[in-house]
Image (cartoon, rainbow, N blue to C red):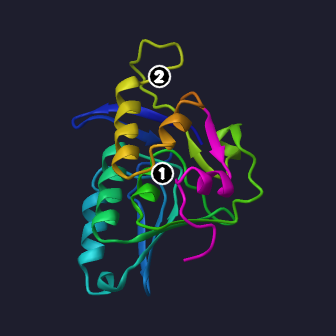
Amino acid sequence: MKHFIRAGVAGLALLAAAPAFALDMRISGNTISLSGSINNGDEATFREHLDSPAGKNVRIVRLNSGGGWIFPAGEIGRLVRKRGLSTYFDVSGSKCASACILIFGGGVNRHYVNGQGIQDGIVDPRQSRGLGFHEAWNPISRHSNKYAPQATGEIIGYYYEFGISAAAKLITQAPPNKLYQISGPTALSLGIATSLARP
């Protein structure tokens, strides 16, 4: 899956090349599962889910997303942190790359499961399985690879806000059209994940 940046009313934002459908959100017991591309407005829907009667029991946010817009992902991450929720990503059946890292990083506890066999390094986004990072892309950028420094800076700002500053170096390891994926043990050693076990 190709990831890119697009200029919008709210500034530059990260967008995955998936169809522009709302992020699917489902509550089951103490877990809300988020799946799909992250789009503008998803932050408000996420808040509504948490404020619903079923949402009062939510303690875990399970992730399966290849990315999306920066702003809603960051705002969801902030709400996750404000509500004291944990985030959960399981390599065996999910992906978490690009803007999804902003939601993952919002977790008070961040569980990265089954990532021990992932090889750290640059991969094609379609082959990524681990947590995946890359520089932001903008179609009007003057850089030959459409690198978007302002949007990349916005993402790094969220990393610092969520206390996962080591991710700032990882985002610069892959150009906009690739992903730098990391294993569970690497994520744990860098403080990006807090556990390799299921919540």
Residue 163: x percent and y percent? 40, 51
Callout 2 crowding tier (Cα within 10 Å): few <14, some 14–19, many ≥20: many
Which residue is tagged 1?
101
The label nearer to you, 1 versus 2, is: 1
Q: From the image, which quarter does the N terminus lie in? A: top right
Residue 47: x percent and y percent? 26, 68
Which residue is tagged 2?
147
Q: In the picture provided, is 46 more to the left or to the right than 128?
A: left
Mark 2: amino acid: Tyr
Marking on residue 76: none
Q: From the image, which quarter does the C terminus lie in? A: bottom right
Residue at figure coordinates x 52%, y 35% from the top left = 169
Decide: is 76 above or below 58. above
Residue 156: x percent and y percent? 40, 38
Decide: is 99 above or below 111. above
Which of 107 and 49 lies nearest the eye of the viewer?
107
Magenta segment boundaries in residue numbering: 178-199
Q: Earlier in the sequence, mark 1 or mark 2?
A: 1
Residue at figure coordinates x 50%, y 31% from the top left = 135
Residue at figure coordinates x 65%, y 47% from the top left = 182
Which of 100 and 183 lies nearest the eye of the viewer?
183
Give the CA separation, mark 1 to mark 2: 19 Å
Residue 36 in sight from this viewpoint = yes
Mark 1: amino acid: Ile
Q: In the picture provided, is 124 more to the left or to the right than 158?
A: right
Residue 91: x percent and y percent? 66, 62
Q: Secondary structure at mark 1?
A: helix
Decide: is 124 above or below 187. above
Which of 47 and 191 lies nearest the eye of the viewer?
191
Q: Secondary structure at mark 2?
A: loop
Residue 112 lies in the magenta stretch: no
Query: Which quarter of the picture shows residue 96?
Result: bottom right
